[in-house]
Image (spheres, grey):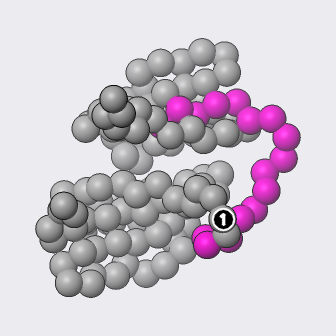
Amino acid sequence: MFTAFEHTGIASPDHKKLAQWYVEVFGFAIVYQSAGATFVKAPNGSMIEIIAAEGDRVELAMKQPGLRHLALAVDDFDADLARIRAAGVKFLSEPVDAKGNKVVFFTDPEGNILHLIQRATPLP
């Protein structure tokens, strides 16, 4: 039986460097590393596998078909927003607060789209 998403994969020209960025900016932990991949884990157990890329990056717009962003749940939106601002991330939007749901879109150093999200009420 399907129970959860175990991890999401990101291809990177320098998987070790990008993994270290996720450790430094979000407090993820490196839980596995090989010559071709690094797994980083969030405090809740969610993981990203960062694999060695092959070929050139293709820039995609936010709403083109396919996987477009990773949403990072936070419990203190304002504090985490301040922390990623201090880390120098590139923002794609201004923070939005809609009915208590706070979001902001940004990229990691390689242009992968992420966003912080804090929901007033979790989805059912």
Examine the image and state in which quarter residue 112 appears.
bottom right
Q: Position of residue 22 (x, y in %)?
A: 46, 42
| Residue drawn at point x = 45 percent, y = 35 percent | 7
Point out residue 122 in the picture as x, y percentages from the top left corner.
18, 62
Near-viewer residue (67 or 88): 67
**Farthest residue in the right direction?**
55
The image quarter in which residue 104 lies: bottom left
Number of marks drawn? 1
x, y (%) of residue 100? 18, 78
Magenta segment includes 90:
no
Residue indicated by mark 1: 65
Give the magenta part as a residue range: 48-63
User: Which residue is drawn at the image coordinates 60% and 15% (left, top)?
Assistant: 34
Work out whether residue 9 can be spotted: yes
What residue appears at the point 14 percent right and 68 percent down from the top-left corner?
121
Report the side of 74 relative to 30 (left or right).
left
Q: Is 123 located above or below residue 97 in the figure?
A: above
Q: Quadrant of the C terminus?
A: bottom left
Residue type (three-letter) at the residue carrying disc 1: Pro
**The stretch drawn in magenta includes residue 55:** yes
Secondary structure mostly seen in magenta is loop
